[in-house]
Image: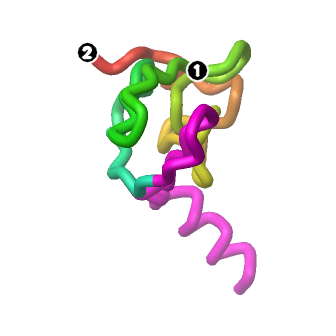
Amino acid sequence: MASARGRQAAATPVLRSTITCPHCGHAKTETMPTDACLWFYACEACDARLTPKPGDCCVFCSYGDVPCPPMQQHGRDGDDAGQPAA
């Protein structure tokens, strides 16, 4: 039964992640896109423009408490991961 729950969790990604600005520490919960990665994020407190850390596909994977939906579903080597949001 536990394995069925694990498959359910993988099939339904978490869509909310709290991004914490590395410059000022401001945190805000945002809704993540389900079909692309977000490359830029502007901190509303200090106006810093966040970009992914090297090796990460998006700002949620770098600064969020939950990785982006493509990473949740496919992992670092997934075909859909790493595609920038338009």
Query: Is the N terminus in the top left, top right, bottom left or bottom right quadrant?
Result: bottom right
Q: Residue at x 38, y 41 (%)?
A: 45
Which is nearer the eye, 37 or 52?
A: 52
Q: Is residue 36 left or right of residue 60?
A: left
Residue denoted by label 1? 52
Numbered mark located on residue 84 in the image: none
Q: Is residue 19 magenta?
A: yes
Q: Position of residue 16 (x, y in %)?
A: 42, 57
Crowding at label 2, few (<14), some or many (≥20) Cα neighbours within 10 Å? few
Image: 5 above or below 17: below
Vertical arrangement, residue 21 with respect to residue 27, above or below: above
Q: Is residue 86 above or below residue 33?
A: above
Q: In the picture, residue 63 is in which quadrant?
A: top right
Instruction: Give the position of the C terminus as an image quadrant.
Output: top left
Q: Which mark is residue 86?
A: 2
Residue for point 63% across, 35% down? 22
Which badge, 2 or 1, is on the more N-terminal residue? 1
Horizontal relation, residue 39 to residue 77: left or right: left
| Label 2 with label 1: CB-CB less than 8 Å | no
Amino acid type, residue under disc 1 in the picture: Pro
Q: Looking at the picture, how far across and down is residue 83, in whole percent?
A: 45, 16
Instruction: Give the distance between the C-alpha atoms of the residues marked 2 and 1, in whole angstroms.
Output: 15 Å
Magenta-drawn stretch contains 85: no
- Dot 1 falls on a residue whose secondary structure is loop
Q: Quick one: label 1, few (<14), some, or many (20+) residues within 10 Å?
A: some
Amino acid type at mark 2: Ala
Magenta segment boundaries in residue numbering: 1-27
x and y percentages locating residue 69 in the rendered image: 48, 44
